[in-house]
Amino acid sequence: MTTEATENTETRTSFALSPEEIEQFHRQGFIGPFTLYTPEEMKAQWRKTRLQLLDRSDAVYPDDALAGATNISNYDRHLDNDFLASHIGRPEIVDRVNSILGPDVICWRTEFFPKHPGDEGTDWHQADTFANASGTPQILWPDNSDFGGTITVWSAFTEAAVENGCLQFIPGTHESMNYDETKRMHYDPNSINSVDKDGIRRGFFGYDYRQLQKDPNWTPDEDQAVSQVMRPGQFIIFWSTLMHASHPHEGKTNEMRMGFASRYVPSTVTVYPDSDHIEEYGGRISLDRYGSVLVSGENKNADNRMVTETTRGKKF
C-alpha cells in the first residue's frame, strides 16, 4: 500500500496579512484588532495566569533586583510562564508579523501594562532604539536599515475601553521621530508629565517624555488621535515609532485594564548591544538569564543572547 507524502504533512491555516492589509499597515502604522481568544477563553486564562505570575521563583529577573522598580518588574514573564511562552509564538500573531518583517523574527521583550482605577493616561511617545528611559540603545538595526523600531503586538487580556484606559494612536506618524532618544530623561516616580487639550492628566511611568522632544514647542496633533477599543482576547499590531498613548482609567469600574505587549524584530537586529544589565524605571536588572526567542525562521545574528526553552523547561 502506497503512503502519500501528504498524509504526514501537517497543514494549518495561514494568518498572513493580505496585500490590502499590508498597504494599510504601511500607511497608518498599525493594523487590527484581530481576535486570538474568545472573551470567555481570555478571561478564564487570565484568572489562571494572574495567580501563576505571583510566583517569581523562576522569573529571569529576581525580586531582589527589583527593589524600588516599577514598570521594569513587568518585563519578560514569557521566559518563565507557559501560557505567555505559547502566546508569543501563536501563528495568528507570528504569521502577521512575518508579513511585515519577513521570515526570520525574534521576540526580544514582553511587558505587562496594567492600568488601575484612577491611573493617569500614558503620555504620547515613540520608541526607536528604546534608549528613551535608560539612555542606552536596547535594539540596533543593521547599518543599512532605513529606520528602526520594533513591531509591538498589544494584546487585551481584559476589556480595553476609553473609560478604563485603552490605547490611542495618531495614524501615519511612524516614519519620522519627534523625539531624540540620545537625550536622557530624569526619573521621578511622583511626576505628572502633562495635561492634554481636554484637561486629561498624562504621565510616563515616572518620566517626562517631553524632555526628549526635538522641538520643545512641538505638540502632538491630538485631533487626529483614534482610540483602540478591544475585547479580551484581541490584539493589535503597530510600529513602536507610531505616536501612541493611552486614556486614563476613570474608575467607573473597580477592574484593572491589563494589556500584554510582545515585541518583535528581524533576527538581524542586535538586542541589548554591549549591555549586561538594564537600568531604568528606578531599577537595575542583570541580563544573565535573559534571552531572545526565535519565533520563526533562522537566527541571523550570532551576537544575540538566545533561549530555546523557558526557565521551567517549556520549549519555545
Image: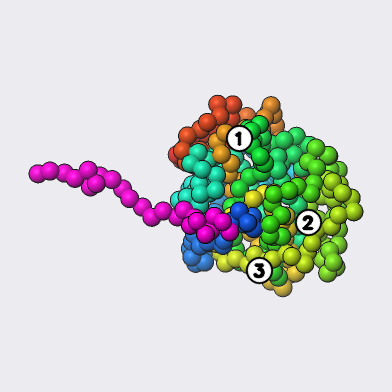
Is residue 11 found inside the magenta-colored segment of the image? yes
> Which range is magenta?
1-24
Which x, y percent locates residue 257?
Answer: 66, 62
Amino acid type, mark 3 = Ala
Percent position (x, y) of residue 183? Answer: 83, 39
Q: Which mark is residue 214?
A: none
Q: Residue at x 61, y 53 (%)?
A: 26
Q: Badge 1: few (under 14), some or many (20 or more) residues near its Cα, within 10 Å?
A: many
Residue at the image position 74 percent from the left and 65 percent from the top: 224
Look at the image and tell me in which quarter the N terminus lies: top left
Say whether residue 114 is visible.
no
The type of residue carrying mark 1 is: Val
**Mark 3 neighbour class, 10 Å CA radius: few under 14, some 14 to 19, many 20 or more:** some
Dividing the picture into quadrants, the one containing residue 193 is bottom right
Callout 1: helix, strand or loop? Answer: loop
Alpha-carbon span between mark 1 and mark 2:
27 Å
Q: Secondary structure at mark 3?
A: loop
Query: Whole-Å distance between the Cαs marked 3 and 1?
Result: 34 Å
The residue that disc 2 covers is 123
The picture quadrant where one finds residue 283 is top right
